[in-house]
Image (spheres, rainbow, N blue to C red):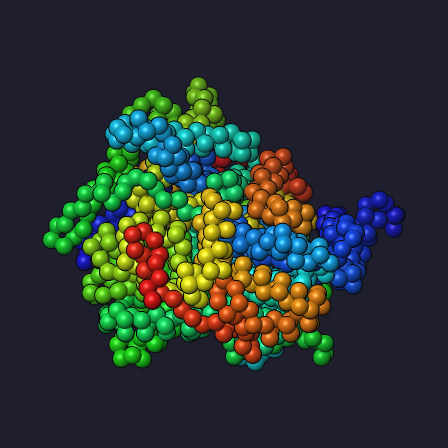
Amino acid sequence: MKITRKSILYAIGIIGVLILPILMNQAGNFYAVRVAGLVGIYCILGVGLNITIGYTGLLDLGYIAFYAIGAYTAALASIAGIPFWFGLPIVIIVGGLIRLGLGAPLLRLRGDYLAIVTLGFGEIVRLVLVNLEPITNGPKGLPRVEEKLLDISIFGFKFTENIHFYYLILAFLLIAILISYRMEHSRLGRALVAIREDELAATLTGVNVARVKAVAFTISGIIGAVAGAIYTHWNGFVSPEQFTFWESILIVAMLVIGGMGNIAGVILGVVLLVAVPEVLRASLGTAFVDYRMLLFGIIMIVAIIYRPEGILPSKRRALELKPIEAE
Amino acid sequence: MIRKLLLLLSILTLILAGCGQSGPQVVKVALVAPLTGDISAHGQGMKRAAQMAVDEANAANLFPQYQLQFAAFDDRGDPKEAVTVANQIISDPTIIGIVGHLNSGCSIPASQVYAKKNVLMITPASTNPKLTQQGLKNVFRLCTTDDVQGPFAANFVVDSLGFKKVAVIHDKTAYGLGLAELFRTQFVSRVYPVLSFVGIDVGEKDYKALITKIKSTGPEIIYFGGMHPECGLITKQAKELGLAIPVFSGDGVLTPEYITIGGPATEGDLSSMTGLPPEKLPAAQKFIDDYARLYPNDDMQPYDPYTYEAVKMILEAVRQVGTNRDSLITTVAGINFTGILGESSFDEIGDTRNKTITIYRVTNGKFVYVD
Amino acid sequence: MFFQQLINGITLGSIYALFALGYTMVYGILLMINFAHSEIFMVGAYIGFWALTFLPLSIQNVVPLHLSLVFVSSIVGAGLLAVLVERIAYRRLYGASRLTPLISAIGVSIFLQNIMQVGVSAQSQPYPYPQSSDIMHFDFFGIQVNSLQISIFLLAIGAMIALQLFVNRTKLGKAMRATAQNHTVSQLMGINVNLIITMTFLIGGALGGLAGVLNGMYYGSIKFNMGFFPGLKAFTAAVVGGIGNIKGAMIGGFLLGIIEAMSVGYISSAYKDVILFLVLIFVLIFRPTGIMGEAVTEKI
């Protein structure tokens, strides 16, 4: 293999992702490790949502609902004494079934109507979590006073520190990327592109549109639920206030700013939108702490104006026929 | 690349923070609260109060051997951000004490992070009982939990006001719901059931439909668990719909902003607060005067006195034993502190023993204490 | 109690409907969800607040003049702000993916909220007008109605009729409808599409500003985050009514307001928004383009 500049850069990147966090941890910078872990969680969410938005072109504004469903299912399973690795299949089944159940009647809606329905569903899930006290403990969150979440453990090794979770998240992210990559470069992936390009033509060439859409939609939801399950264990506590509409919007923004349909772009978008507020937090200090979100808003506008197709646009999407104007 | 840049940046900030100063040892007291976002009014108030306490100590040159600094952090009332900030705080070895967070949903996961590094944490505002029941020895709470205020209010309604018909409203937050539930439990145990028990959404503006429904049940008083923006609108709209009964609420409502929002409709409304009224404590009156002088454009928020007191307590502990994290925690656990809230000390799990409650009534557009 | 709830719902619905017009007009022309509209509403309320507070006393003493200046300034101010936002944050993005202006709108929304919080106040501001002595209360057989509610309802209906007439009867309105159907062909017919887009934002923003002032007067206080909840509801109303359709926005707004009041009155206060969004989902399942929406034949 020829050693090019690009491959050297990749190698440095991979080593950085693997080694740097542990160095930071040794140096006592738990903050950097935490941010790296958060970037990882949002990368999983981004990769998952990218399957819905980037590959099939369906706009989902309530993706956070599945993150919440995963988080609460995992918490309830753990409280019931089920270890994480046995709870995970439950999370996958619950998340997948709800996503499928939501998708079945809704996937025939077009574009923006699907967007507003998913938005509504996201709000419904949050409100149910707040109001369904006997199960979710309402706004007071899980676990309750007398309850405890079980630690995640592999062969007796317990995940307790940020750095442990960082590597766990990294492993799950790799799996998510692998699934996403396989989907894009398979029969299913090509079918998805065909649907996004022209649904009618895809049907005529023998693509089972309804099924292909439902499969992609469901897998996307499951990935979100799994991210929620890991996050709950990392935080040790889950309450409804973190699953707001803005959170869904933020993930969509990550995809668009990074570059939809392209995994590298998605990851870049996540790094930007999760890391920028943290860099601002670290650099602004006490005197300017109030201006953090203000700057964040400006950065978002500037980023999108200067790179409307995203920072790393998908090559495949760029080649697609574009309508001259919005219909 | 970007991630590396970020890491590089954070290393740089740490290095700068770590070795920027020479001379006396830097000691920081941190405030964590929602400084941006929907409930930033409370967080900003807490920041002002904490800043005031630190400035006073510096002006009095209380610690000539240290360079005492104040650091404010923003959690936006979001548990995810709270944990991130907590990690940022434990990465800074010069921070010796934390005052915060506001929301219980933030305090609980963040307290677990602080516990790992044995950092002293005093919350001036989180009232969820679970916080101190986690068995973390670094966690203290200066405000009372909901289980003191709610029952006190219920007894007051029965004994002093003599009302038997109560409608209870809460804002579906850990604080509001907790308070309302404990009010209801006590009220019911005094023989009377409540007429209704309903939740509302924070941030909404129109409660007329709910009030119309409540009015049809004929209550004598409304008990509200939650914060002032919603309570102000409820009392205003109740009077507009001809339901001229007082609204009784907890410490989350006791701020002039409540009267601003509710207008003349608030006249006769009641609110409970921990501690003695400032009129009976000279120290508190001085705090109120100083606050008004330093921040003429801002109203005092309900948790500002607690925040001020919490910072003072941490500084007192530093004065006694220096900056060792373990000794600071032991010192605060055994502290007997007299300040603007009266006498405060902590029980074995870290809750305050200062459980005096004062009832206030809106009279001529001001909160005035009743007994 | 039923009629009281109906009154509550109609007042709420009037504000949703006015608010929803801004969403629906922009969507009709650009197929874009303008998330910043809820912040235009908020800024409109603040402009009204400033006009109420800072105009010279000689004007404040003449109540009708003062009030009309308050309305004019916030309507014009909010309209111009909406145009400015379009120029800076959206105009360069129309060629790109449909999601792109949406993200820019979110950035604008975050920016406007935070600039008001940092630059003005994080606290609620009391609305100086009307004081309770300025409001007339009527009691019809136990049903409470006040002059403010009636004015809000009449203003909302008036604004909508005027808008409907403008769009259907004037040349500019015709150009607007043409642009909504097809930008390129409209351009070929000599319509200045950019001007039409500017007009759309101006009118939508102005109505948002009007809704903001009315909201401030009705509820008596304003805050930097006041746009979020009504914005979400108004947008839902626009979709339920059939987005892009002016009559639809009106019907959707009133429908949502009434459903909200009735769910609180007869079902559950805690679950009222769940009911609202369930209605939305069911309407869209059975009428995928909303109540007034026309079935669009797919272009191939």
- Residue at image x 84%, y 44%? A5
Q: Residue furthest front?
A: B282
Is residue B103 among what the camera can see?
Answer: no
Viewed as shown, does residue C290 lie left or right of B337? Answer: left
User: x and y percent of residue A176 in the render?
Assistant: 65, 60
Looking at the image, which residue is at 39% across and 35% down?
A: C50
Q: How many marks?
A: 0
Front one among C175 and B326? B326
> As displayed, is residue B237 above or below residue A169?
above
Point 76% across, 59% down: residue: A24
Q: Describe residue A143's horizontal placement relative to residue A165 as left or right.
A: left
What percent of the width, then of the height, locates residue B225? 37, 64
Q: Is residue C124 above or below residue C174?
A: below
**In the image, is B76 to the left or to the right of A4?**
left
Residues B306 and A119: in front is B306
Is residue C166 placed above or below B285 in the rendered structure? above
**Residue A80, x across and y down, in percent:** 53, 79
Q: Is residue B331 visible?
A: yes
The location of residue B140, given as percent across then percent down, is 56, 70
Question: Would you identify the image quadrant in which residue C62 lies?
Answer: top left
